[in-house]
Image: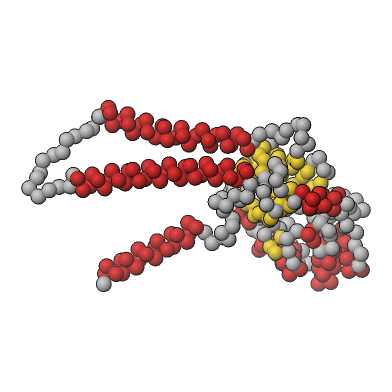
């Protein structure tokens, strides 16, 4: 009975451990199913280290079990076994083997890391994106295209996209498990890396460096599109439809001008100032997430605007729960009309 109880306890500890180690996130957010060249290269390095570790564990375990059985104490035999302390041969052996294993691991790791940081080729007109991390959101600027957006990075498929990463405040890290990462974003300097995706889709990104209260919710998405669709998106971003059409949207734009404009910018409008402190909201209606993590719908939009602190702790977005129901509805209507 006691043995049964102990086994049950052991099994439950093991179950909890497995749950914690594997996490509860969707299975597609994993480095084990890369969707591009950069991700595949990283997986190769990860697999190599797993093979080496497995090999070491297997060899050590085999020797351990062999010694346990072969040299166990036999009845009537109390002799001391041969002492090997200070054996030059053994010392050399277990110093040289790890050095060799580390060298095998280091060469492909360094090669891959340096290849990810390669410069954008000057002659081919590569796509460059300046990524700026803020507490707790992401800004994506396409300097050659004259586009600035936030939270959702659009890239064309089958093409290397060269990122220039920096931070506006503290250290963050850019990580898209299926595509690439992790690369730090440091204030005052620029790190470089390229990413690519070989199939269209929306890939989840995370901040991978503890950066404050909202760190765990500093999510973003990479939207990979066929070249044709990407070009259409670029055209749309260059000529956004940001002017209100209905009476409701017009009233909503008024609310926006009075309350949001000093922090948020919307391109393609006749507004006097352009907020730079918070995400650019051009084309907001087409984003699939609000604040990088909530499904984009009216209910969540209201929740975010009224109680941002509950959604993302530490956010600089102030609460707008003082707006009347009518103003709130109009503001939502305006934001959801931005394409
Ligand atoms: Cu930004 Cu963690």
Q: How is the image coloured?
A: secondary structure
The quadrant in which residue 297 appears is bottom right
Q: Is residue 35 left or right of residue 237?
A: left
Indicate the quadrant containing the C terminus: top left, top right, bottom left or bottom right. Answer: bottom right
Q: Position of residue 177 (x, y in %)?
A: 60, 50
Q: Does residue 180 show up?
A: no
Question: Furthest residue to the left?
Answer: 76
The image shows residue 209 at horizontal and vertical percentages of 59, 47
- Name the outermost residue toward the top: 88
Residue toward you, 50 or 135: 50
Q: Nearer the viewer, residue 111 or 189?
A: 111
Would you place residue 222 above or below residue 323 in this image? above
How many numbered circles are shown? 0
Residue 202, compared with residue 66, is above or below; it is: below
**Point 70% across, 41% down: residue:** 160
The image quadrant of residue 25 is: bottom right
The answer to whether residue 8 is seen in the rendering is yes
Q: Give residue 304's position: percent from left, percent from top.
A: 72, 63
Q: Residue at x 81, y 66 (%)?
A: 332
- The N terminus - image quarter: bottom left
Residue 7 lies left or right of residue 213; in this view the side is left
- Residue 34 pos. (x, y %): 59, 49
**Residue at the location (78% across, 43% down)?**
142
Q: Residue at point 63% right, 56% down?
A: 217
């Amino acid at each position: 009975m006691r043995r049964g109880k102990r086994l049950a306890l052991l099994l439950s500890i093991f179950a909890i451990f497995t749950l914690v180690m594997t996490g509860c996130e969707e299975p597609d957010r994993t480095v084990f199913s890369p969707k591009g060249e950069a991700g595949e290269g990283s997986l190769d390095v990860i697999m190599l280290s797993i093979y080496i570790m497995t090999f070491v564990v297997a060899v050590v375990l085999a020797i351990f079990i062999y010694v346990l059985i072969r040299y166990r104490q036999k009845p009537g035999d109390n002799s001391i076994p041969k002492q090997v302390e200070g054996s030059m041969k053994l010392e050399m052996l277990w110093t040289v083997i790890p050095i060799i294993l580390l060298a095998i691991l280091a060469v492909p790791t360094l090669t891959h890391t340096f290849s990810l940081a390669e410069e954008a080729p000057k002659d081919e007109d590569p796509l460059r994106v300046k990524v700026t991390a803020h507490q707790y959101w992401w800004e994506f600027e396409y300097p050659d295209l004259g586009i600035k957006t936030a939270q959702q990075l659009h890239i064309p498929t089958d093409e290397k996209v060269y990122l220039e990463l920096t931070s506006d405040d503290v250290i963050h890290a850019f990580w898209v498990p299926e595509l690439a990462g992790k690369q730090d974003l440091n204030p005052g300097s620029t790190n470089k890396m390229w990413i690519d995706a070989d199939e269209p889709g929306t890939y989840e990104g995370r901040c991978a460096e503890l950066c404050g209260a909202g760190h765990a919710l500093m999510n973003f998405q990479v939207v990979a599109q066929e070249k044709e669709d990407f070009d259409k998106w670029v055209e749309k971003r260059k000529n956004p439809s940001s002017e209100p059409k209905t009476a409701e949207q017009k009233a909503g734009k008024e609310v926006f001008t009075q309350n949001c404009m000093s922090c948020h910018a919307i391109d393609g409008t006749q507004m006097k100032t352009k907020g730079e402190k918070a995400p650019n909201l051009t084309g907001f209606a087409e984003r699939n997430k609000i604040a990088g993590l909530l499904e984009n719908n009216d209910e969540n939009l209201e929740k975010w605007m009224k109680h941002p602190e509950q959604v993302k702790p530490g956010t600089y977005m102030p609460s707008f729960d003082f707006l009347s129901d009518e103003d709130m509805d109009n503001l939502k209507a305006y934001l959801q009309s931005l394409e």
